[in-house]
Image (cartoon, rainbow, N blue to C red):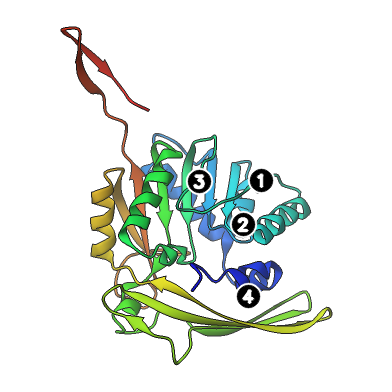
Amino acid sequence: MPKSHHRIYDRARCYDVAFGFRNVAAECDTLAALVARHGAGQRGPAAVLELAAGPARHAREFARRGVVTTALDAAPAMCDYALACAGSDGVSIEAVCADMVDFQIGQRFDLAMLLMDSASYLLDNDAVLHHLDCVAAHLADGGLYVLEMSHPRNSFAVGKSTSTQWMSEADGLRVDMSWGGVDDAFDPITQIDEVTVTMSWSGADGEGQLVERARQRRITANEFDALVRCSGQFDIVEWLGSLAPPLPFSNEPAAWRMVPVLRKRAAKAVTTVRGGELDASTPE
């Protein structure tokens, strides 16, 4: 079984239409405010990294605001689509095709973000910790990492925070999505769902349907907090339940997401003894 729903993501235009309901500008307002509130003495981010970026709507919005932006995605079709959209928008972004668990970019950022519950594709603790290390290596000291994750009420089946079936339409293209099927299995030991996604589309260029199954992990708030502590790279400085509007993390219905806000710890000086003398150095 694939690590992600890669065939769905290869249909970049359809995916973009399906998830075009988000208020990207308002969400970027919240992200910028988080940097101003918790970052290293900044009014807002100067360099932003969007992980598992898909169409890179948030990266493109930050680029409109004059921010240097990079969009990373594992699907080449998404990277090509994001660049094409940025060109149509009249903005410049960098697109990097790479795995979000293990990537190298020759730049450090003030803000990194992983939205749309893409963290659910980190299927075990090693993947989460490796991912956190990789993100930390690309953040400036005091830089923020914001993740938008599924609300824990979904994990424990005590309510639903999102719709699993919906329809979106733009520029004559209609896309019907179904995220999850009645026969999908859940393993309570690994906390992994086998998730069937059905995407149907119709428009001037024809119609079609894709059905694909991949694994996604349910992660709880306490569990994620423990993983962040274990990584030693970050402190969680705030929890939100929504990016737009920016609501506190709670069990209220309007708080439909779990959004931990992580701040990278500053590198600490390490004191070693060399030749009988104390030598203090700060590792990169």
Q: Which class describes the residues within 10 Å of circle 2: few (<14), some (14-19), or many (20+)?
A: many
The disc placed on residue 93 is 1
Q: Residue at x 36, y 53 (%)?
A: 261
Q: CA distance from mark 1 to mark 4?
A: 23 Å
Q: Secondary structure at mark 1?
A: loop
Is the residue under label 2 in contact with that under label 1 (CB below 8 Å)? yes
Q: Residue at x 78, y 74 (%)?
A: 171
189 horizontally vs 21: left or right = left
Give the residue type that dot 3 points to: Phe
The disc placed on residue 56 is 2
Q: CA distance from mark 3 to mark 2?
A: 17 Å
Please tell me which of labels 1 and 4 falls first in the chain: 4
Task: Return the residue at label 4.
Answer: 18
Instruction: Report the residue that reaches farthest toward the right.
Output: 204
173 horizontally vs 155: left or right = right
Please tell me which of labels 3 and 2 falls first in the chain: 2
Please tell me which of labels 4 and 2 falls first in the chain: 4
- Vertical arrangement, residue 53 with respect to residue 203, above or below: above
Foreground pick, 169 / 72 = 72
Looking at the rendered image, the disc whose residue lies closer to the viewer, 3 or 4, is 3
Q: Position of residue 182 (x, y in %)?
A: 45, 92
Q: Which class describes the residues within 10 Å of circle 1: few (<14), some (14-19), or many (20+)?
A: many
Please tell me which of labels 1 and 2 falls first in the chain: 2
- Vertical arrangement, residue 61 with respect to residue 268, above or below: below
Q: Position of residue 199 (x, y in %)?
A: 62, 81
Q: Secondary structure at mark 3?
A: loop
Give the residue type that dot 4 points to: Ala
Task: Return the residue at label 3.
Answer: 103
Pick the quarter of the image with the C terminus: top left
Q: Is residue 284 visible?
A: yes
Q: CA distance from mark 1 to mark 3?
A: 18 Å
